[in-house]
């Protein structure tokens, strides 16, 4: 089994001290993968920056022009109260999007069976026309559209289990029936989107599936959501490619959220996505780094994803089970409502 690995040393150049989304996040992941000896087992890719054409396939010209203005500046720009950018940040963001594109290329051309893209800044909050939520370019959205435009990959399924709703990805594909977006996220929570009733518009009606859950839910609740909602929705959609926006900020130790996933639970999610890809789209799957702000949970989470992609059964979980996860029975009403709304 060949696993492509896309990352770049320049991802540390986008950095602002004391901000939650800092260079130490990706350095922790790199360190963990290196210490585990996994870098000798993957196919390392050298990413190229995303082009204007690739970016403009999902973002507006105004979005791109705003980043160009940042690159001509001489200090820290605040694009919103949460989102910073340095003069070098637009180039780093282009490289992050390009890394995900490269990972998709490797899978769709058969050079690799699957891939992981360890990138930053993250992307899933970047809408068609706005940078927000630590995100400058929507890496997953750019790569999904590239798969369609370059490889004629007709139907892309994006599963987002970052603790925050991927409002940017939803925004970009909301009216598009060729991309199905499924999100499990804490609610109410930032960015305030992702209600169950947000299901798409026009031709895209029904191709957005939101599962907003209250803080405190853990492994058992996520497993029920996958078994009873995600699987039937994915099987009906029948994707050609599966992209996973993987955030480890739903872990029970994460400082920015209140969910109760464990690393073992996260490993189950990754392996379930792998099973889904193997059954529905010939194993074509790419995992893309989004959030996660406890460095150890983040690093071990990505170590487990890499092991799963490589076919190893080993799971690293230094924290152990969550101390107080809500019972999965509390999610029953949401499951029933989602199935009724989406005809599952």
Image (cartoon, rainbow, N blue to C red):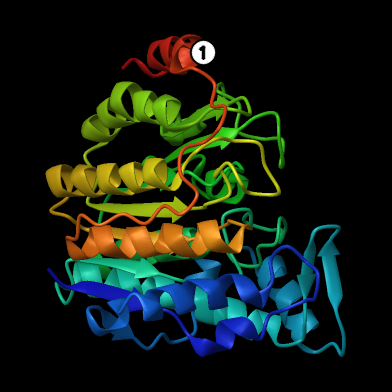
Badge 1, how many Cα within 10 Å: few under 14, some, many 20+? Answer: few
Q: Is residue 110 above or below residue 20?
A: below
Residue at the spot x=50%, y=49% of the render? 319
Q: Is residue 96 above or below residue 268?
A: below
Q: How many marks?
A: 1
Q: Position of residue 90 (x, y in %)?
A: 66, 80
Q: Position of residue 3 (x, y in %)?
A: 23, 71
- Quadrant in the rendering for residue 286: bottom left
Q: Is residue 59 above or below residue 342?
A: below
Residue at the spot x=39%, y=75% of the render? 33
Q: Position of residue 27 (x, y in %)?
A: 55, 78
- Quadrant in the rendering for residue 106: bottom left
Q: Secondary structure at mark 1?
A: helix
Q: Is residue 22 above or below residue 181?
A: below
Q: Quadrant of the N terminus?
A: bottom left
Q: Is residue 32 left or right of residue 190?
A: left
Q: Nearer the viewer, residue 79 or 34?
A: 34
Residue at numbered disc 1:
330
Residue at the spot x=27%, y=30% of the render? 231
Q: Position of residue 92 (x, y in %)?
A: 60, 82
- Quadrant in the rendering for residue 300: bottom left
Report if residue 53 is visible in the image: no
Q: Nearer the viewer, residue 104 or 291?
A: 291
Q: Is residue 303 left or right of residue 260?
A: left
Report if residue 109 is visible in the image: yes
Q: Quadrant of the C terminus?
A: top left
């Amino acid at each position: 089994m060949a696993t492509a690995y896309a990352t770049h040393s320049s991802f540390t150049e986008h950095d602002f001290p004391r901000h939650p989304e800092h260079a130490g996040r990706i350095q922790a992941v790199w360190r963990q993968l290196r210490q585990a000896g996994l870098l000798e087992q993957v196919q390392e890719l050298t990413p190229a920056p995303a082009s204007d054409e690739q970016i403009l396939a999902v973002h507006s010209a105004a979005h791109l022009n705003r980043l160009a203005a940042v690159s001509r500046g001489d200090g820290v720009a605040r694009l919103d109260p949460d989102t910073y950018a340095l003069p070098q940040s637009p180039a780093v963001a282009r490289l992050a999007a390009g890394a995900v594109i490269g990972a998709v290329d490797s899978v769709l051309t058969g050079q690799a069976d699957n891939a992981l893209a360890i990138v930053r800044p993250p992307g899933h909050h970047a809408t068609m026309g706005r940078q927000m939520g630590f995100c400058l370019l929507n890496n997953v959205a750019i790569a999904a559209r590239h798969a369609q435009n370059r490889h004629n990959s007709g139907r892309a399924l994006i599963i987002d289990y970052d603790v925050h709703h991927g409002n940017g990805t939803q925004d970009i594909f909301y009216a598009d029936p060729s991309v199905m977006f499924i999100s499990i996220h804490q609610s109410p929570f930032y960015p305030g989107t992702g209600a169950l009733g947000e299901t798409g518009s026009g031709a895209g009606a029904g191709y957005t599936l939101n599962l907003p859950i209250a803080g405190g839910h853990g492994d058992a609740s996520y497993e029920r959501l996958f078994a009873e909602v995600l699987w039937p929705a994915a099987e009906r959609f029948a994707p050609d490619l599966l992209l996973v926006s993987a955030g480890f900020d739903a872990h029970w130790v994460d400082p920015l959220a209140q969910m109760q996933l464990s690393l073992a639970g996260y490993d189950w999610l990754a392996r379930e996505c792998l099973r889904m890809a193997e059954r529905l789209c010939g194993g074509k799957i790419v995992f893309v780094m989004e959030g996660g702000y406890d460095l150890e949970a983040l690093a071990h989470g990505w170590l487990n994803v890499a092991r799963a992609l490589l076919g190893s059964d080993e799971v690293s979980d230094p924290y152990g089970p969550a101390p107080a996860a809500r019972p999965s029975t509390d999610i029953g009403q949401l499951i029933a409502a989602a199935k009724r709304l989406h005809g599952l």
